[in-house]
Amino acid sequence: MKHRRALFITVPIAILLLPLGIYLVDRATAHDTIARNVMVEGVDVGGLNIADATIAVENDLRSSSGVFTVNGSTFKLSPVEIGLDADVASAIAAASEARNTGSFLARFASWLASFSKSEQVPLEITFDRDAIDSVFDAWEGTAVSNPAFEGAVVVIDGVVVPQYPRSGEGIDRAFAVTQMEREMSRLDKTGVVVPVIEVRPVLTNAQIDATAAEVRTMISEPIQMISSEVGFRVTFDTKDLAAAVIAGISEDGTEIVSTFDPEVVLAILEPRRTEYEILPVNARVDVNLETDVISVIPGRSGPLLDVDGLIASMKAASLGAKTGEFPLLVGAQPELTTEQAQALTTLKPLGGFTTAHPANEDRVINIQAMADEVDGAIVPPGETWSINDHVGERTEAKGYVAAWAIINGVPYCCDHAANIGGGVSQFGTTMFNAIFYSCLEDVEHRPHSLYFTRYPMGREATLGVPGPDVSFRNNTDSPVLIKTAYTSTSITVKMYGNNGGLVCTDITHPVEDVVAFEEELVADELDEIHPGERVKERGGIDGFLVKVDRVVTYPDGRQELDLALVWRYRPLTTLFTVHPCEITGEPIDCPIKLPSLINKTWEQALATLDELGLLAAKNSGFVDNPEQDNIVLLQDPAPGEWVPFGSTITLTVGEFAE
């Protein structure tokens, strides 16, 4: 009886625990997906990860067009046309939390309910009301035969034409907007009939006449606008004024207002813009790199056109004295003001570096172009600065040219996109060493894959777009000023700031694990090299591992190591171009350079050809000198010619007849 009672107790417990076990397994295998039967605006995202769920909702939402009927005309409307936007990210985040919040029992109960009941997650959707109004305007133009008209004042060939308001039909906009937004927010669209109602204009004929009279006055005579500040004056003739004047209905629809179109006015002024609008000029910081004396070349603010003020001034002038002020916004500040630049004169030299290069190479053009772009850069405290962010892509439009570059680990020139700006890694190396010795924080740099003796081992950097890059963080409490200088054979980068008196030096350890370069042969594709000849295309470079430490010395004499650089350079083969037959791999017999067989006996010639892997064909040539009997008189091809292995050489052999 005890066994039977235990069985009756155990079986129900097992039955109850079975769903719980399934739940635990289900959630363990689907921990990175949204719970079952979760819907976002009608889209089932259950079982999808966040990325796939986002795509599913966005695709369904933006691909579902609506159908609207206006006066019996049917229009298909895409969500894109009315600027539909939705906060899909927030909805998906909420969906990922659905059925996964609350206590364990609450989550378990929600899981059980997911098999029979969906959970809806709301999606916030917005529309562009201006775009909706434009759609309604287009529909009315097509489907409404007698549309209402609010009236207008236009200028045609210099003549002011009033267009009076009239009653008619139009879409019930307030109601239709609500219908449209509700319909376009749903995936299960059913189609909407847009109501058309009688529309009575708000404006009156008297308002149109008053504005038309005002416009006639505005364009009746030329006006002159004068800037006393910069001595600029401009005359708008009646043709200019007629082209620029416009009349539009106010936002509340209660009046029609005349003004001048800013775009037309600016187009008229554009040829003379530099006479009145002067761009701000940055102050410049000049540094004598030998004495480290910093001086400032002042900048200046620049007046900018006050467009809104000009339009208002033009209207007042056109309705009044026919002259008015040409207003300018004075004092637009440069990015670097004279006062800001003056504050930099207290900076001290932190560190710098110079590297040398041959003169008159294409790469020097690129190095100097980059130096010019970087010169004078200022890095505020705590900010990160990078060459690529500051300079951008190297292009021919910026003055960069094609030059040698390391592409896929091999020096190459010059039909690759990376060759434009080739050689600027020398600037990157110089910049990195200036950062290194200034005790600034290294953020990103990467040495070359190959070692070049013009750079310091392990303490150099390559550049590319979008990477590799050279960047640092100004880890001081003072701005850092970057200055560059160059000669025909060198490039210098020097940093100025205040790092608290730190001094940085390097310890470059002996190289380790040297891998000697090997020889590489490539086949001659131009058929210019004979067997046994070699043309050296490049020298080889050994590979090795090098370690470089940066040692920081504090003002109190204390020292610590704050950078431990380790880099392995790859070896580069020395490259020779040879005849294809000398490339290892497939056994190919080389062509043979024919020796001279003339004056040899037939037997001697035959033996020589046999040793060379050549065949012989014998022609008799009758001679009257017995000493020429059995002697080779002629050979074809001639001596010195190159012939394929196994070729037949025709020999003319003397035959003496008594």
Image (cartoon, helix red, strand yellow):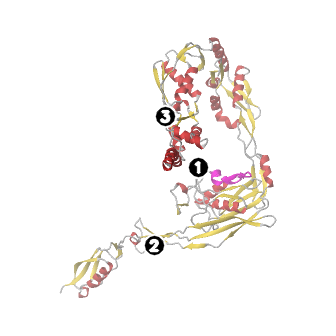
Disc 1: CA contacts within 10 A as few (<14), some (14-19) or many (>=20) = few
As shown in the figure, which amino acid type bears the numbered disc 2? Arg
Please tell me in which quadrant of the rendered image residue 228 appears: top right
Tag 1: residue type? Ala
**Disc 2, SS:** loop
Quarter of the picture containing the C terminus is bottom left
Q: Seen in the image, is 144 located left or right of residue 293? A: left
Q: Is residue 386 magenta?
A: yes
Frontmost residue, 417 versus 20:
20
Residue 342 in view in this figure:
yes
Q: Is residue 219 visible?
A: no
**Does dot 1 land on a helix, a strand or a loop?**
helix
258 above or below 536? Answer: above
How many other residues sit within 10 Å of disc 2, few (<14), some (14-19) or many (≥20)?
Answer: some
State whether residue 440 is above or below residue 301.
below
Residue 220 horizontal/vertical position (percent): 66, 19
- Residue 63's tag is 3
Q: Which residues are magenta?
A: 373-391
Above or below, comparing residue 162 to residue 503 in the picture: above
Name the residue carrying label 1: 397
Mark 1 / mark 3, whichever is N-terminal: 3
